[in-house]
Image (spheres, coloured by chain):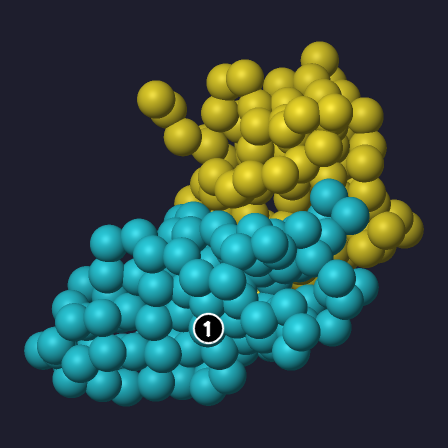
Chain colours: A cyan, B yellow
Amino acid sequence: SQQGEEDPQALSIQEGENATMNCSYKTSINNLQWYRQNSGRGLVHLILIRSNEREKHSGRLRVTLDTSKKSSSLLITASRAADTASYFCATNGNNRLAFGKGNQVVVIP
Amino acid sequence: EAGVAQSPRYKIIEKRQSVAFWCNPISGHATLYWYQQILGQGPKLLIQFQNNGVVDDSQLPKDRFSAERLKGVDSTLKIQPAKLEDSAVYLCASSLMGSAGLYTGELFFGEGSRLTVL
């Protein structure tokens, strides 16, 4: 089954810096999504990129998708303390959404 | 717009006991999911409903887990008997059904039900 694998697993940065996370997957997909999860809460959808798209922006978020390498990256620019959370990529193929293990991001004020 | 509602938020039981979780999805969302999230891991799909029919339950441990979605709205997930390894957060999510009845877009998650099995 498809499953995203994020890299790096944990990231600690200063407020104002950029945070980059990568995700790799193994099979073909219809789209790839990124979610955020604050401690003790449910997941919140951030951005979706379709298999025929290469880059997408939403506010301070930038996601790229390279289907030839089966990989995606999420960039958070000008990070804030409120961005401290776990970030998950999820691959959608055959109408199933499979999540990776997640990245823990800590933004130090 | 009301979000996905789940209850209870926390439950502590002893092994071999039973537990049930309830989920009310966003109004109009045809697809409902139950995910299991073990501490430090990503969510793992247990079961996916489309209206009141099961789309995927391939990762549901059917000897102890059961789920239903009566009338295509609310859903319950039951564990009986519980094992220590069932300690996790159980997340319910819902989504709109895309064209041709296929899932296409984002999932909306509830806050989750945290289960501790002692």
Q: Give percent across and percent down for residue B67.
A: 76, 36
Q: Secondary structure at mark 1?
A: strand
Q: Is residue A94 left or right of residue A19?
A: right
Q: Nearer the viewer, residue B70 or A56?
A: A56
At a point 40% along the width and 57% down the height, the residue shown is A56
Q: Give percent across and percent down for residue B117.
A: 62, 62
To which quarter of the image does residue B82 belong?
bottom right
Label 1 belongs to which residue? Answer: A73
Furthest residue toward top: B71
Furthest residue toward right: B63
Q: Nearer the viewer, residue B20 or A51?
A: A51
Is residue B10 positioned above or below B67 on the image? Answer: below
Q: Is residue A72 left or right of residue B35?
A: left
Quarter the C terminus of chain B occupies: bottom right
Q: Give percent across and percent down for residue B66.
A: 80, 40
At a point 73% along the width and 52% down the height, the residue shown is A93
Q: Nearer the viewer, residue B3 or B78?
A: B3
- Asked whether residue A52 appears in the rendered view, the answer is yes
- Asked whether residue B79 appears in the rendered view, the answer is no
At a point 18% along the width and 81% down the height, the residue shown is A17
Furthest residue toward left: A109
The chain letter for the residue carrying disc 1 is: A
To which quarter of the image does residue B36 belong?
bottom right
Quarter the N terminus of chain B occupies: top left
